[in-house]
Image (spheres, helix red, strand yellow):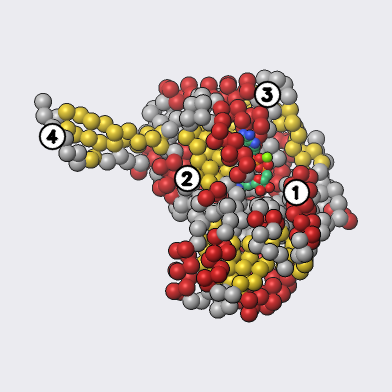
Amino acid sequence: MVTLPKNYIDLHPEVEAFLSQTLPMYYGGKRAPAQSGKTFETVDPSTGKLLANIAEADQADVDLAVQAARSAYETGDWHLKMTPSERSSCIWKLAELLESHKDILGQLDALDNGKPFASARDVDVFWSAEHFRYFAGWPTKIEGSTIPVSTPGMFNYTLREPVGVCGLIVPWNYPLLMASWKMAPALAAGNYIVLKPAEQTSLSALYLPKLFEEAGFPPGVFNVLPGLGHKAGAALVAHHGVNKIGFTGSTEVAKEILKSSTGNLKRVSLELGGKSPNIIFADADLEKASVGATWAIFGNNGQSCTAGSRLYIEQKVFDEVVSGMADETKKIKVGPGMQLEPSHLGPVISTEQMNRVMGYIKEGYDSGGEAVSGGQRIEGDLSEGYFIQPTIFKNIDDEAKINQEEIFGPVVCAMPFKDSNEILQRANDTQFGLAAGLWTKDVNKAHQIAAKLQAGTIWVNTWGNTDAASPFGGYKQSGHGREMGKEAIELYTELKSVWMRIDG
Ligand code: NAI
Ligand code: MG
């Protein structure tokens, strides 16, 4: 039984019961321990203390889970035996269940990730449900076409079919939401999924079997394998029974995945990191831009693939914007996501991540940077957790490591620029291309710059918006493929061309 700090909000009784067991994996409609009997721990990053023990999947469990998904696929329990309308209803029902369990799922993600309970519930769970609702509309709309081929006497049409068994490997920054981004389109397209949550944040994923069962999904359609990346994740990627891998995580692991997916040349889609440029022009609404740029980086504690981590501010308003951001940052309350007095930001996810981020902060100082705000780990009452002050650096070169590599923590570098020509070249000078943003009141300039920035998503006078209906993904080393919208349906389907002689 976990004991949490006294200043935490009361646990939902279901959360308390859930955490009091060794959490099993789930495949073929059944809960199971690891074949090896092994377990691993998940801890509260606000305290470093144990939250729960979890069954640890390795090759043997991956084999069983993939087998369960494959046999459901072979018999067509989901994509053939159910009508599109029935699949729609199941997916919609799941969305409703996510919503009616938002307190439970929100607490699980808040405990496991450290983020504020209100964000976990009202942002992550809310948008997860929205995602399922959007994709619930798709099963009845996935169509092929009739094609006017030039061969005489032939009728040709296409069928859009599920890819088959999809391994979905997700990170810890938005545990339920990142899983939902992949599960919803995969299921809408008629696939059978094996979800591998991040080892730091498996709790919400492990609560899902109950909801999938209640929503009426047949056994084997949804399977979840908790475990470590280099074991369970790697085994899933290499498995010949898996037709596709959908991955969100680091660029480094993505390269490993591409290499080890070659055994059966499975399809791979990758949503990776970023070092997104956020550009503030002097003609912007500077107050809004300062607040916007502050949250572009510090939202979710900088642990977002789209974090606005390279901040370019037009020279003549540089000091004004930076001081506006420093003021905004002073208002940010950092603390455990589950504490009674609400915080805006929680800890970073792990000791490993804290050391990584503090290493970059040290690089910042070493390369001559000045911290306008933050720049330290938070100790005192919070010293058991992985808390870092939201940090704004200035006086750092574009080429510095801290300005080129993804930090994935609450650290931003602010840099002045002279004009539009200069800024485009500098903004695009990165290995990544996930997102970029600009702030200006000049509509022409906004369109011109948006067209030239090399990134999958551009935000103008805003930051961070995504929607199930709008494609999302990266240029360059930020990934392959687009999630969301009709593009996600393409990502999770095969297209079959059927030829038929009709001239007798
Ligand atoms: P990671 O890429 O190692 O982990 C993401 C997921 O991949 C987890 O589920 C993990 O278990 C799995 N994984 C790890 N190694 C694997 C392998 N060999 N085969 C298959 N699956 C594997 O990310 P990590 O180590 O947790 O964080 C390190 C850095 O990666 C962060 O600081 C950040 O820069 C970046 N990152 C980016 C994310 C994004 O949303 N773009 C999300 C998470 C991390
Ligand atoms: Mg890793």
Residue assigned mark 1: 356
Residue assigned mark 4: 152
Residue assigned mark 2: 481
**Disc 2 packing (10 Å; few <14; some 14–19; many ≥20):** some
Disc 4 on helix, strand or loop?
A: loop
**Disc 4 packing (10 Å; few <14; some 14–19; many ≥20):** few
Q: Which of marks 3 and 1 is nearer the N terminus?
A: 3
Ligand 2's quadrant is top right
Q: Do the residues labelled 2 and 3 touch (CB within 8 Å)?
A: no
Label 1 CB sits under 8 Å from any ligand 1 atom: yes
User: Quick check: can you spot residue 422?
Assistant: yes
| Image-quadrant location for residue 308 | bottom right
Q: Which residue is depicted at the point 54% across and 36% down? A: 258
Disc 2 on helix, strand or loop?
A: loop
Percent from the top left, x then y, of residue 233? 62, 32
Kind of residue indicated by mark 3: Pro
Q: Which residue is depicted at the point 55% across and 48% down? A: 477
Disc 1 on helix, strand or loop?
A: helix
